[in-house]
Amino acid sequence: MAALAAAQEHHDRAPDDPFTLKPLSGSVYALYGRGGNVGFYVGPDAVVVVDSQFKDLAPGIVDKIKSVTDRPIKYLVNTHHHGDHVGGNEVFRHFAVIIGHDNVRTRMLASPAEILRDFPARVEAARKAGNEAQAKQLSEQIDSAKSVKVEEIPAPVLTFDSELRIHVGDETVQVWHTPPAHTDGDAVIYFEKANVLHMGDDFFNKVIPFIDVAHGGSVKGYLVALDKVIGRVPANVTIIPGHGEVTDVAGLKAFRQYIADVLDAARKAKAAGTSKDDFVKQVDIAAYKDYSGYADRFKSNAAAAWDESP
Ligand SMILES: [Zn+2]
């Protein structure tokens, strides 16, 4: 997979360059970096970008786009509110209209208050666990939450509740809100003519997902969202996941199977009278052990699935 990606790259990369640019069909590109995958479309008079990774990476994202076109970057669509997808908004806001689901804006604006509410206890816990570095990092976030002005947060300025379309040249960029899956503000972006779909974190390819239950995410919701998307796109669509490599519908269906398998394991355990603690301790699905993030996130996926099981 990695060798193929390298062969398809058409720009030389400096050793310290975190990016890999992958041309897809119809002037759509995938850009891998350190956060969530970026996608962009180069139209005759405007560039449409999906997600902005982190603030420190955003200038590099802009440079990569400028390496293939001198057309202006006019639109940035956020797939959801997480920092590894919207961190670069602060850079893009100066030249692009930022678009996202209503809840992306709401969540981003609520973030400082949430940090002030939740982080002091986390600093305490980190200190108790002897993790000074983490305590320091959390304290810094509390400090910046205290000083930030809500009206200066670079949240989407154009929001929608269900769908919208961006018309650039002969391309129609469809933006659909999906039922809550990763968060309650998820959007997927379909480049109709190019037949390329950017799924944000509704899709982790061969990567164990983070399911943000605290912000409206749901394991069962993932199945509903994925089925809706699968039912709406052509079978030969090219898919950019939020994390992992570009793939196709078969790759998406493998991820759907993962979600179904976790839910199934939880439902069976609950029906057999197993306690949540015991289930989470014992649960293991061999087929997904080679997915990245298995050690970090699989158990919390299983715990959420248990909570949502009948
Ligand atoms: Zn996310």
Image (cartoon, rainbow, N blue to C red):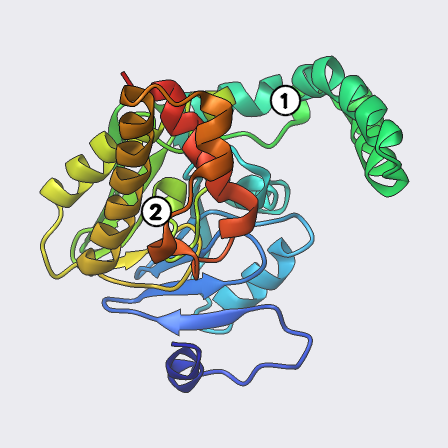
User: What residue is drawn where x is 25% and y is 54%?
Assistant: 254
Few, some or many C-alpha atoms within 10 Å of disc 2 (few <14, some 14-19, many ≥20)? many
- Quarter the C terminus occupies: top left
Residue 109, quarter of picture: top right
Count of marks, rendered view: 2
- Residue 140 is situated, as x and y percent measured from the top left of the image, at 84, 33
Find residue 88 and name its label. Answer: none
Residue 270 locus on image (x, y percent): 33, 22
Above or below: residue 104 compared with residue 41? above
In primary-sequence order, the first of circles 2 and 1 is: 1
The label on residue 203 is 2
Q: Nearer the viewer, mark 2 or mark 1?
A: 2
| Residue 249 at x, y percent in the picture | 18, 56
Element on which disc 1 rests: helix
Task: Please report the residue visible at 69 percent of the width from the left and 53 percent of the height from the top.
Answer: 56
Q: Is residue 167 visible?
A: no
Q: Is mark 1 within 8 Å of ligand 1?
A: no
**Type of amino acid under label 1:** Ser
Secondary element under disc 2, as helix, strand or loop, is loop
Residue drawn at x 38%, y 24% as measured from the top left? 306
**Image check: 62 left or right of 23?**
right
Residue beneath disc 1: 111
Seen from the viewer's position, the closer of residues 60 and 34 is 34
Residue 123: quarter of image: top right
- The type of residue carrying mark 2 is Phe
